[in-house]
Image: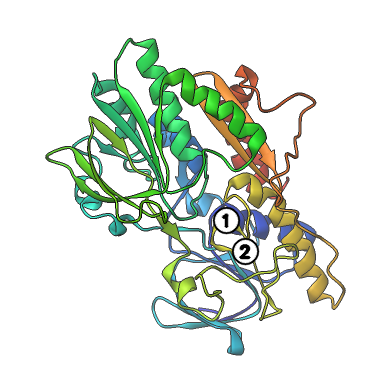
Amino acid sequence: MKTQYQIVIVGGGNAGISIASQLLRKDSSLDIAIVDGAKKHYYQPAWTLVGGGEFNIQDTERDEASVIPKGATWIQQMVAGFKPEENKITLADGTDLGYDYLIAVPGIQLNWGEIKGLKENLGKNGVCSNYSFATAPYTWECIQKTRGGKAIFTNPHTPIKCGGAPQKIMYLAADYFKKHGIDSQVEFWSGGTRVFGVEKYENTLKKVIARYGIQTQFFVKLDEIDGPNKKAKFVGIGESNKDQEYWVEYDMIHVTPPQSAPDFIKTSPLANAAGWLDVEKHTLQHNKFKNIFGCGDAANLPASRTGAAIRKQAPVLVSNLLAVMKAKSMTASYNGYSSCPIITGYDKLVLAEFDYNNTPVETFPFDQSKERWSMYQMKKYLLPYLYWNQILPGKM
């Protein structure tokens, strides 16, 4: 196996594939390796719709080989570590791979094991999660089987990919229960301090919560699942309730697991004190190692971790990396743009778009904080098409 490349990309997800495609479209002579051991590639934003019975899980999966851009070399291994002082990464089999430039976009790590009893009960005993290809269909099964009692939806105390996802499935479930005359109490247990970080959209979501009669509890984290007895333990994490402990019975519970940068990033010289990839938030260049760039869910960027954010980050990273390679000044800048299509019910969606300052940055010439049928159709039909046919091939 060749052990030296001009550009090594760690991660074959949305960011890694679209960045490789854009680079090769700019210069087909670039010598690029994509390092990722995954055999499958997933369109994860549709898993909410899978959980709500609106999308076929099989349509979210393709072979990883089918999305690797022509001209790039795919190294089917995971990464074990980084040696930035030597311009090398270490692969899982112990081999060192050298690079002139490194792009670190490994995605986020789901820490299922941080919640006692979660792994053993996930996919049974009414414990579901849309954050896994294997378990997203069980969410729909749980919603359909619920006949009353309590339906709990959790949001962890950590940053997560697609920050609106824990709420989206909750609103779909609440709408389903309402339409079918099911008297189930829906509850949102969150490690956050509020429903949504941008006031314009939060005002709409508060009305949605009131419409469904959803009860909310903030500054708590899920600590344990007792599947056979259908009970969940939450603990307080705020100053006012840090010693509080709550055991709550449920009929179904949708769990969003705590998340972090991958362990091989957290323990590496590339990480900041909090364990995230340490890049400059506008240029996406590493703060210490100038031949390293990164973006996406593993980066320390104070932006919402979404595919839409990556779509705006990728061209900035590509432009600045090519400038550095030519010993020119970096001129591209990422403003923190992110988008969160928040499903608020069947055929209803609020399209939140905002920047680093949580200022709305909207695409369409209408008030996007209103629930719209048209935006739901865009989420269900247009965005998956664009992902596979435009974004991954580096066309947009």
Neighbourhood count class around disc 1 (C-alpha, 10 Å): few under 14, some 14–19, many 20 upward: many
Report the side of 189 relative to 115 (left or right): right
Q: Which residue is mark 2?
A: 72
Query: Which residue does the numbered mark 1 point to in the structure image?
Result: 68
375 vs 12, left or right, is: right
Task: Indicate the quadrant where residue 101 lies.
Answer: bottom right
Determine the image quadrant of residue 91: bottom left
- On screen, residue 138 versus residue 34, left or right, reads left
- Give the residue furthest to the front: 240
Q: How many marks?
A: 2
Residue 393 appearing in the image: no
Q: Tell me, yes or no, whether the two marked residues, 2 and 1, touch with CB atoms within 8 Å.
A: yes
Residue 78 x/y as whole percent: 43, 69
Q: Tell me residue 255's x, y (percent).
A: 34, 43
User: Which residue lies at the image location 41% right of the left edge and 21% below the top edge?
Assistant: 213
**Amino acid beneath label 2:** Ala
Specify the amino acid type for callout 1. Ile
Categorize mark 2 by other alpha carbons within 10 Å: few (<14), some (14-19), many (20+): many
